[in-house]
Image (spheres, grey):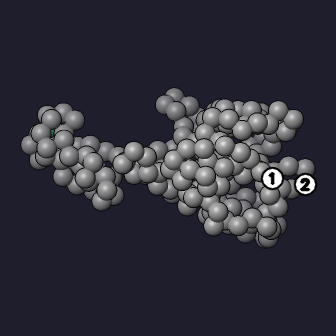
Amino acid sequence: MNTSNQKIFIHCPRCGEATLEPATKKSLTCTACQFVFYLNCAAATVALILNEKNQLLVTRRRKDPFKGTLDLPGGFAEPGETIEQSLIREIKEELDLEITHLEYLCSAPNTYPYKSVVYPVTDMAFVCKVKTFATIKARDDIDDFYFVDLAELDTQLFGLSSPKKIIQHYLKVLSQNQPPVFP
Ligand SMILES: [Zn+2]
């Protein structure tokens, strides 16, 4: 369990006593009633979208965490969604783009600090094709977007850690001229 989460989750959601104690890296147990509270990994998607010039679509975050830093489009899966449905929905919401093809690339663990809680996340990255870029606009959680040459992309400008790892993995795959594989 992340140490900052230990300070946030104190009261048992079942009996209400201030008796939650860290049990494992993803759970706390109530010493009064033995209730177990899990903070499991949230599933999230990341899209690598390239234009006809082979430039990567990157976004700028409108909100915290890491407001103002670069990011890749995507977001959290909602209950009941497949990960593919989640990715298609997020890209429509954030950029008004319609994904027509997606191919799994790799995954990366991430942490997402939000309002004092550090959420563990599993990001799943897909290389995507879109119907057209004519409709593109920045909205929802996105302040702006850019198409960047992969060779000129400075991954240090990304706030979250997983986009850096995913882009580095993608560059490695491209350099080896192999289809996407697990890292
Ligand atoms: Zn309890």
| SS for dot 1 | strand
State left or right for residue 152 relative to residue 61: right
Q: Is residue 138 above or below residue 167?
A: above
Q: Which residue is identified by label 1?
A: 147
Between 54 and 180, the one lying in front of the other is 54
Between 113 and 182, the one lying in front of the other is 113
Mark 2 or mark 1: whose residue is earlier in sequence:
2
Q: Is residue 81 above or below residue 23?
A: above
- Quarter of the picture holding the C terminus: bottom right
Other-residue count near label 2 (Cα within 10 Å), few / some / many at <14 / 14–19 / ≥20: few
Question: Residue 33: which quarter of the image?
Answer: top left
Q: Residue 60 appears at what percent x and percent y?
A: 66, 49
Q: Amino acid at mark 2?
A: Lys
Q: Residue 20 appears at what percent x and percent y?
A: 18, 47
Question: Residue 91: which quarter of the image?
Answer: top right
Between 169 and 155, the one lying in front of the other is 155
- Res. 179 mark: none
Q: Which residue is identified by label 2?
A: 53
Between 78 and 63, the one lying in front of the other is 63
Disc 2 C-beta below 8 A from ligand 1:
no
Question: Residue 170: which quarter of the image?
Answer: bottom right
| SS for dot 2 | loop
Q: Amino acid at mark 1?
A: Phe
Q: Nearer the viewer, mark 2 or mark 1?
A: 1
Q: Is residue 80 above or below residue 104?
A: above
Q: CA distance from mark 2 to mark 1?
A: 9 Å
State left or right for residue 174 relative to residue 30: right
Q: Residue 179 appears at what percent x and percent y?
A: 77, 59
